[in-house]
Amino acid sequence: MSDVKITIIDREGEAHVVDAPTDMNMNLMEVIRSYELAPEGTIGICGGMAMCASCQCYMLNFEHMLPEKGFEEEDMLDQAFFVEDNSRLSCQIPITDGLDGLEVRIARHQNDIFSIE
């Protein structure tokens, strides 16, 4: 079994260094869910089909190493809240050896648009 270390900053700002297996055909969203780094029902709502933006993350490094955004991902991000230049849908990022050391921050949830800051 081969694992890579990924740092995931949750919505509260806490950093978690996790082991992500490269030999299980997982994507970043599934890793976030398996470590329960976002409340149930707030990430991966569509099951990883790029049909919602609940798994949006900000890539803090390695952007050049990631696969290019597909049409579905681009289209979904065009409709999402809190999108930044480094936004990606984590369901579209397969876990590979090249992601060792990746750092990401989970985007705010769309319901946060109604919260008072």
Image: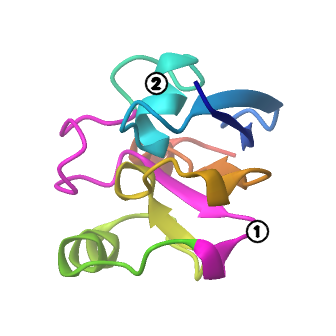
- The picture quadrant where one finds residue 75 is bottom left
Quarter the N terminus occupies: top right
Task: State whether residue 87 is above or below residue 94.
Answer: below
**Predominant SS along the magenta part:** loop
**Callout 2: SS:** helix
- Residue at the spot 56% in from the left edge and 47% down from the top edge: 108
Does the segment drawn in magenta span residue 52?
yes
Q: Amino acid at mark 1?
A: Asn
Which label was assigned to residue 61? 1
Note whether 107 is above or below 78 in the view shown: above
Residue found 36% across the figure and 45% down from its top: 54
- Whether residue 36 is situated above or below residue 100 in the rendered picture: above
Residue at the spot x=73%, y=50% of the render? 100
Residue at mark 2 to residue at mark 1: CA–CA distance:
21 Å
In front here: 49 or 66? 66
Q: Residue at x 54, y 52 (%)?
A: 96
Residues 13 and 8: in front is: 8
- Side (left or right) of 105 relative to 109: right
Give percent across and percent down for residue 9. 74, 40
The tag on residue 33 is 2
List x then y, in percent, for residue 7: 77, 41
Percent x, y of residue 62 = 71, 71
Please report whichever mark, 2 or 1, sits nearer to the chain's N-terminal start: 2
Query: Is 50 in the magenta?
Result: yes
Q: Position of residue 74 (x, y in %)?
A: 29, 79
At label 2, which amino acid type do we have? Arg
The stretch in magenta equals 43-65
